[in-house]
Each structure stands twice: as C-alpha cells, then as structure tokens.
Image (cartoon, rainbow, N blue to C red):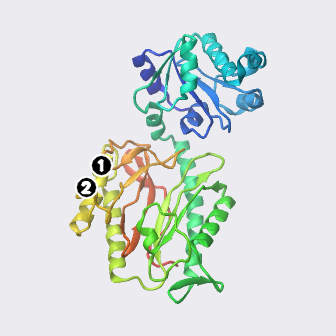
Amino acid sequence: MEPDLSTLADALEDAGADGYLLDADSGDSDQLYLSGFDAPDAFVTLYTPEETALLVSGLEYGRAKKESRADEVARLADYDYPELVGEHGRAGAKNRVLAAFLADRGVESVAAPERFPLGTADALREQGVSVEVLDGDVLTEIRAVKTDEEVAHVREAQEANEAAMAAAEDLLAAAEIEDGLLYHDGEVLTSERVTEEIEVTLLRHGCALDETIVASGADGADPHDRGSGPLEAHEPIVIDIFPRNKASKYNGDMTRTFVVGEPSEEVRRRWEDTHEAFEAALDALGPGVTGKAVHDAVCDVYEEKGYDTLRSDPSAETGFIHSTGHGIGLDVHELPRVSPDGGELEPGHVVTIEPGLYDPEFGGVRIEDLVVVTEDGYENLTDYPIRLRPE
C-alpha cells in the first residue's frame, strides 16, 4: 500500500518545514503507517516531499530494507554511533547521529506531532535544527480515508471477529439456567470463560486482542466495564470484541447484546429501541453527511422514546451516554468521529455504528456494526445477525 501523502506535503509547505519527523516504535500507528515498518523499538522516520527515509539500529537494518516502504534506510553505525556512545552516552550519541542524518538530506527544519519526544526535540534544537509541532492531526486525517487494500484488511479482522462472536454465542445458547446463573458443562459460565473462548478463536483466525467486554447485569451498564464473574440469566449480556489482525495490524469491532432466559419487558423494549436507533444511524449515513448528523439521528430516536442522552442532558449518567461511533483502522479508536463534533464523512471512512442504553437497574444494551462510507452510501463490513436470544 502506498499512501497518498500530498496533504502532508502541503502542510509542510504551509509550516515552512523541510520535513516531517517521527521518533517512535511501530506501536505508534502514525509511525507504522508512514514507514510501513513494524519494529518493537523506537526508530526514526523522516518524510520530505522528495523521499521517505528511515534511521534504524543495525539489528533492524536488513529487515527495514526489505519490509518498509522507505526510499532509503540508514543505520546508526553509518554515523560512527559506537564511537559516539563512548563519548556522549547512548542518548547523546543517537541525537548527534540524528542531526547528521538530517543534515545529509539538507533538512534544517522539521515539523513533528504533538507527542514527539521532548528530549529528542531539545537535542536537535541544541544542534541547530528547528523543531515545531505541526498544527492539526494531518497524518491521522490522512489515515482516516482508507484505500481498498486497507478496507480489505479491516474486513478480514471483522471476519475473525464474527467467528469469535459465534463461539461466544454458542456457549450462551448451550447454557443451562440454575438459581439465576448460567451453567455450561456443569460449571458456572463466567465472563472469563467466554472471554477465553473468544481469544482462542481469534488466535486461530490470525488475530489477537488485549481486552474484550463480556459484561452482564449491572456490569454492562458501564459501557467499558470488561465484566467479570458468573453470567446471569434473564439479564442482558453485552459482548464487545475489538480484535487486531496480527499480520496487517488493522482492527475489527462489533458488539452484540444477548439474553439467556426470559428478558423483562423493559430489557426487551430497550433492545428494540436500540435496534431502531441503530437503523436510524445507518439510514442517515453517507458521503457528505457529518458524523454529528448521524449521531443526532440516534439521539432523536432515543429522546423521542423518553431516554436521556448527553445531547439532552450533558450530565446524564443513564440512557445514551456516549457517541454513536468512531473511526477504526490501525487504531481501534481513530478519526473520523460519529459524535457531536463529528465532521463530514468521506468515501473510504470506516466507522462503527454503536448506539446503546445503560442503567444499573436494567443493565446495558448495545448493538455495533462496522461500515465503510462509499461514493453512494455505505457498505456494512459486518455479516453477523442481530438478535436478542442466542441461537
């Protein structure tokens, strides 16, 4: 994948900077995107309108030359790094090498992201290199518009997600009820047991995740409570899975809410109202529409039915108490926003649609799919049924 970085070039021209500099490991998604290189230790990427160049350790040099999308790869040893370490220490040596690396490319001024390392910035300034923060999230905004290849990566992660959700639903569907709790194979079915099944399934599909949400009853009334302990019968169980593909590094995201047993009339009503709000968001979605307008469509449904939203009451602690969705890609939360401050949606934006209702008295209810905005509407990247009772 070759990203279109023309917007970054324009931003550098407006800032009067020779290049854009990153000093981070590939856990920083901007670094991974710009360099195309996955490494656990920090390395440097320099972007100029003419080329992209990396500065890496000798350990990563061969792999960076093969795997990165850089036009040129340099290594610390090319600049007498071992000798400089003896004189200035590791940090001092690296900063002197970096200054020489920039000088070799005629770069006297760089723009950097807001979270650029302060020590690196100060050291470069001491050596005569101008370092300024680039206004706005330019690279993050570029990342928000996905190529066809990126959409395919997200779709692959979501397919693994669907397999994991099916594994979780199978456990719930096979569960028996005893004393208000769920049992599976004679043992109490817990959040941890369902999470384990989700994680194992994801690994078999080339994905992993740091955390997931399997929360029943009052736990599910906190949107980001991961859930723990025995799962309750007749209560909503919120399952939210957001895996990352281990090869592509792109994420998926999906939520379903299930009830094993008999949901109360209030829980059923809240689930049906959330499904209606979900459909209203999809009906509003399309190119040129703002994320705010999609969010407002959800709030309209909920408020008409008598629920609090943060739009109607910014201090609300129950009801609809989060935004409608977010962008997803190399990060599980990235631009664009489907929220009160959400801007115009463009073809290639991949976003979640996830309305929900929360109240400790009734638990939580959330439904979430992952969609991509297209030239004439949207395509749902999620192919998993929406139902309250597990099958």
What kind of element bears circle 1?
Answer: loop
Q: Which comes sooner in the sequence, label 2 or label 1?
A: 2
> Is residue 386 among what the camera can see?
no
Label 1 neighbour load within 10 Å: few <14, some 14-19, many 20+: some
The residue depicted at 43 percent of the width and 17 percent of the height is 13
Residue at 42% in and 50% down: 326
Mark 2 nearby-residue class (10 Å; few <14, some 14–19, many ≥20):
some
Q: Which residue is mark 1?
A: 340
Quarter holding the N terminus? Answer: top right
Relative image position of residue 19 (x, y in whole percent): 52, 19
Image position, residue 372 (x, y; %):
44, 50
Query: Are the residues tagged 2 and 1 within 8 Å (C-beta)?
Result: yes
Number of dots carrying numbers: 2
Q: Is residue 92 above or below residue 200?
A: above
Give how far across and how far down residue 259 sits, in percent. 46, 78
Disc ID at residue 311: 2
Looking at the picture, tell me which residue is in the foreground, 328 or 80.
80
38 lies left or right of 178: right
Residue 291: x percent and y percent? 33, 48
Q: Is residue 354 among the parts visible in the rendering?
A: yes
Residue kind at label 2, given as amino acid type: Arg
